[in-house]
Image (spheres, rainbow, N blue to C red):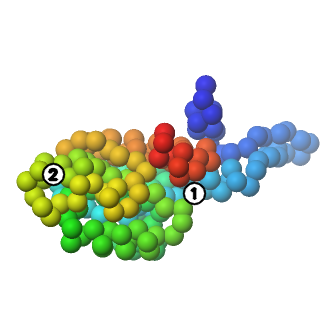
Amino acid sequence: MSQLENKSQNSFPGEVHPVPGGDVVLTRLDDVINWARSNSLWPLTFATSCCGIELMSVASSKYDFSRFGFEVARASARQADVIIIAGTIVNKMAPVLKRLYDQMPDPKYVIAMGACAISGGPFFYNTYSVVKGADHVIPVDVYIAGCPPRPEALLNSLITLQQKIKSGYTREQIKAG
């Protein structure tokens, strides 16, 4: 069993040691911080096209991403941990995306959702104004393929990101794995 699977089975980091009069939980402070950080991710939506509809459905009652600790989508970059880029990025929007990313507090994570956000999608060859992927503007941690990807795929990527944060992975390790 991998370290990620082993740590994700525990709901709270640490080990419970029985002592007379109650139990004591022993853990490292880093584990508690990573656990808290992973269970309170606040996404910032950057929906510019069709994938925005799939992104909205993840917050609906059918999928309800708040039950996994993603709570509400933030309208301010200064209150967000994760930016979800859903849709086409044009040259005029690229500086806005960069500004929003710079305003987010550290640690911050980026998810590129859909073919347009990953590579320019069907507009790659025929349009001069489309950025050929979000990673040309800001660093991307997680890519979700599809046109548009299903809500389950976005939910799966958010949960996977959450598990990696709980395990104490650095941003470079999250991008690589």
Mark 2 vs mark 1: in front: 2
Judging by the rendered image, the residue that carries numbered circle 2 is 124
Expressed as whole percent of the image width and height from the top left, the position of residue 162 reads 51, 48
Q: Residue furthest left?
A: 126
Image quadrant where one finds the N terminus = top right
Query: Where residue 129 sits in the image (x, y, percent)?
Result: 15, 64
Q: Nearer the viewer, residue 46 or 172?
A: 172
Amino acid residing under circle 2: Phe
Closer to us: 177 or 3: 177
Q: Residue at x 65, y 57 (%)?
A: 33
The x, y position of residue 32, in whole percent, is 68, 53
Q: Is residue 87 above or below residue 177?
A: below
- Write down the residue under mark 1: 37
| Label 2 SS | loop
**Nearer the observer, 73 or 111:** 111
Position in image of residue 112 (x %, y %) = 33, 52
Give the left or right position of residue 120, taking residue 137 as reference: left
* Res 153 → quadrant: top left
The type of residue carrying mark 1 is Arg
Q: Secondary structure at mark 1?
A: helix
Question: Taking the image as drawn, is residue 75 in sight?
Answer: yes
> Residue at coordinates 20% horizontally, 52% vertically from top-left?
120
**Residue at position x 18%, y 49% from top?**
121
Q: Is residue 79 left or right of residue 133?
A: right
Labels 2 & 1 near each other (Cβ < 8 A):
no
